[in-house]
Amino acid sequence: MTSLRIVLNFQAGFGVLANMFLLVFYTFIILCHRPKPTDMISCHLTFIHIVLLITGADVWLWDIFDSLNIENDFKCKTHFYISRVMRGLSICITCLLSVFQAVTISPSTSFLAKFKYKLKKYMISAFSFIWSFNLSFSSYRIIYSGAFTNISETKQLKVTKFCSLFSMNYIIRALILAVTTSRDVFLVGVMLVTSAYMVIILFRHQRQCKHLHSLSHLRASPEKRATQTILLLVVCFVIMYWVDFIISHTAVLLRMYNPVILSVQKFVMNVYPTITPLIQISSDNRITNMLKHMQSMCHQIFKKR
């Protein structure tokens, strides 16, 4: 267990640092330059991933709570609620990013083209709806979670050393499972459809460029790089999300939450928010150019010395 804890803390620490760098970059771009339509969404997603990684690392969160002398029951409710909200926001914002990129690269003759110049207008409404839905829907975690007690242990599912999930009415549990599954299936379906649409557009563009003998232009296309990045993010998210979904729901249904299962679930859940900034940093020319410029400046400074 000690080695698993070290791996989880390293993963969380590395992911937080990478996302912090990306958050500073996107904030600078949004405030000081002309951002792309997807930059605001990427900035939003980066912030969500930072919170998700911090709540996933129990050591950090519990140390903060302990320093504030907060009771275990409040700690548990806060932990379960925030992690559930951020998990829902992550899938919603990733789906939104995929949809906006599909609209951005759509040809002028397509049905989606008329939405290109209204993306910023729809973005605020989309953010408001996504946050409102996830904050309200995940509120059941506040009611059905809390500190573990020795009284009526059969009505509790011990998840961590101090926290547990309380048993709920069969109808309520079925309703929550139905809404959660429906939301996830719908959003993943939208991501897969938009991804297939973007692949078709890229394939047509590549074929046209081959016909015009301008492959160099295709390779240098920022739209193509951005689209490939989002496609890679979607594929990673879909794989990791459903692995996490299967593990968590199997554990709850079978009431078998042991430390190893919990650690594996946390590792899987944190893979996507950890690798997302690495994919975005490596594929965004603005970031690579900035890093090269900083490297040359540092080289000149040390050379003068």
Image: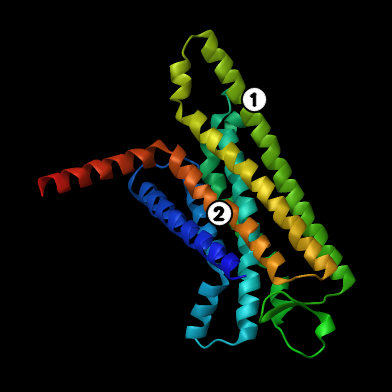
Q: Position of residue 188 (x, y in %)?
A: 71, 45
Q: Position of residue 186 (x, y in %)?
A: 75, 47
Please state which amino acid type lies under the numbered disc 2.
Pro
Disc 2 versus disc 1: nearer the observer: 2
- Location of residue 180 by image quarter: bottom right
- Disc 2 target residue: 273
- Location of residue 292 by image quarter: top left
Q: Is residue 80 above or below residue 245?
A: below
Residue shown at the point (63%, 28%) measured from the top left: 199
Disc sitting over residue 231 in the figure: none
- Location of residue 21 by image quarter: bottom left
Q: Is residue 90 above or below residue 161?
A: above
- Disc 1 target residue: 200
Q: CA distance from mark 2 to mark 1?
A: 27 Å
Secondary structure under tag 2 reads helix
Q: Is residue 111 above or below residue 151?
A: above
Quadrant into which the N terminus falls:
bottom right
Residue shown at the point (46%, 26%) measured from the top left: 221
Find the residue positioned furthest to the bottom: 151
Residue 116 visible in this rendered orientation of the protein: no
Drawn side of residue 110 relative to residue 250, left or right:
left
